[in-house]
Image: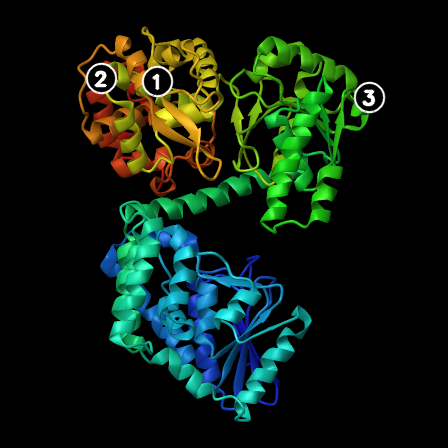
Amino acid sequence: MIHAGNAITVQMLQDGIAEFRFDLQGESVNKFNRATLEDFKAAIAAVKADTQIKGLIVTSAKSTFIVGADITEFGDNFAQGAEAIVEWAMPVHEVFNSFEDLDIPTVAAINGTALGGGFEMCLVCDYRVMSEAAQVGLPEIKLGIYPGFGGTVRLSRLIGIDNAIEWMAMAAPKKPAAALKDGAVDAVVPADKLQAAAIDLVKQALEGRLDWKAKRQEKLDPVKLSPLEQMMAFNAAKGVVLAKANPAQYPAPKLLLDSLQASSSLPRNEALKVEAEGFAKAAVTPQAEALIGLFLNDQLVKKTSKKHEKGAHPVNLAAVLGAGIMGGGIAYQAASKGTPIIMKDIGNPQLALGMSEASKLLTKQVERKKLKPAQMGEVLSRIRPTLSYDEFKDVDIVIEAVTENPKIKAAVLADTEKAVRDNTIIASNTSTISITRLAEALQRPENFVGMHFFNPVHMMPLVEVIRGEKTSDEAIASTVVLAQKMGKTPIVVNDCPGFLVNRVLFPYFGAFDLLLKDGADFQQIDKVMEKFGWPMGPAYLIDVVGIDTGVHGAEVMAEGFPDRMKPDYKGAIEVMYDNKRLGQKNDVGFYAYQLDRKGKKAKTVDPTAYELIAPIVTGEKREYDAQEIIDRMMLALCNETVRCLEDNIVATPAEADMAMIMGIGFPPFRGGPCRYIDQTGVAEYVALCDKYAHLGKAYEAPQLLRDMAANNKKFYG
């Protein structure tokens, strides 16, 4: 053994060719953490000291190659400021450079996932051979940063500026064929031939059949484009990239382009200094903090869900009650992920609608070439429409998705319980009605749980799993595991009106109604909140959700939380409902809707909406300051999120933030309500609450925030 460390081993294979093997002890994957970087340096020194080594292949002992840098260490590093980040990055570059500068040919044998720093390790090698089962890429933009271990410099020299920008700005992992086509890897082979292929490349280099020194030199020299060609390439890239990523919301893509443009005409070492300085600028932005926090929160939510696996009983057959758009979507989602499902309704037309919904979603998959027609047939065969409960004795879980009416739901749930086994779980897809209340209709409330999908089911990643007062741990665990199997992210919450997401959303709509009453223009509110980062403003959102749905939900919330969700005035949303304007459901709401060329409903200004709202406006009609609109909308939403933490409806700030991002489209680059409060400053946020407290209870700072402000505490860090 030439080197035996905690993360890397080096041993001779044959004919002077050694294996440089990543195998981080105590971890399921390889990653570049402090320990790995230290061992990396020691392993390189061992290779340099052994004169018998004539060539090197770089491998992984794990099923992945290297997943990238250890993101859990970013917080400590990035908190030191931009200058300290550059001081941290440059020694890392020196280690990578020392590997790249070894006086022997090197080949990366990429057996699995090589992302971020993992692929940057591959780039320091002279050649790269990739398994057919592997994928590579530089996804750092998703974290609000960009590649910082030399990826911007080396990739642009290997595959050209245009391709490198596409790889890094789009952040999508590349499959073998695409990586080979662009020139990012030199060969693709079956997994069982990978090591042999890597050794063969080293032998070809040693025998002079491959000019490995010339290949390496390409990465050391400036990009081979004239100044005019560079300018044209970057101007074109900026037009495309910045059109998709607003620099005010996502600064990293622009910083990436600026860094690449400044470094392209420089040799490697100088170019790496430019990369480090730009990387540091991105790393200290609030967007990077939020997006890195979002990634870590996502990992925490997944880890929390995984803990339920031991207590779950398997779901081999599911059923859904109600074959509408929602029921059809649930049936599609279960069947497409491999779970057979019975779909029951009271009539053939309803069943036809549910099957049509599933078929429509699958047809789109076939048209996009994500599914073959035969696979579509397999998925549809897993959905069994029925008008009776006859087959329900074999069902492990039933998901009720009938109309949002407590009396109807209670009757359907009671009938269902009589038709299933004693241990069958019954879940309700209700969006607002208390699970504890619905359980009163059942003989076995311990088997009853909420399983709230969001519409459209196939697109929305979140599922709220709601624990009623008598819901058993087994019912929760089994429902969580099923949601994961269906490709969703489950978050367990305790029971209350609206649960977590809708409980938080309705004060946001309440703030919107109050702004309109005080004289604000709903179009201005929409524009301000969309610029803030929401995918759609509140007027547009309630039109899409359905104004009738909004009014029904508001009634439930007003009953549950009258002190802050029961207004003493008629709001604009209710006015729209009274005038049978339901939003996109009947093409008139705050806006009017008509089909565009692509067959999608496009909104247009409708003067009638303003005429209807006019009688309820008691304030002076005026254009509001954008920050006042933001403050009034966000305080109501964020305060209710904090109250859900106070009331133990949701267990952690991480789960609360993830639920808002996945459930209602909270701007990801702001990290969620709790992260938003942190970045505002808790004391400053409480002062804002005090400023607007005269508007009502929804604006008063929760006690938890006052305590945090007094003790200089944050939700994160």
Camera-side residue of 85 and 233: 233
Q: Secondary structure at mark 3?
A: helix
- Neighbours of disc 3 within 10 Å: few (<14), some (14-19), many (20+): few
Q: Residue 33, position in %: x, y? A: 44, 61
For label 3, the residue is: 390
Please state which of the two labelled residues, at mark 3 or mark 2, is closer to the viewer: 2
Q: Distance from label 3 to label 1 (Cα)?
A: 45 Å
What's the residue type where badge 2 is placed? Gly
Quadrant housing residue 101? bottom left
Where residue 485 appears, as percent x and y from the top left, is 64, 40
Q: Which sits in the foreground, 532 or 449?
A: 532
Give above or below for 62 relative to 558: below
Q: Which residue is at 24% across, 57% downward?
A: 82
Question: Label 2 belongs to which residue?
Answer: 519
Is there CB contact under 8 Å for labels 3 and 1?
A: no
Point out the tag, 1 or 2, that comes first from the N-terminus. Answer: 1
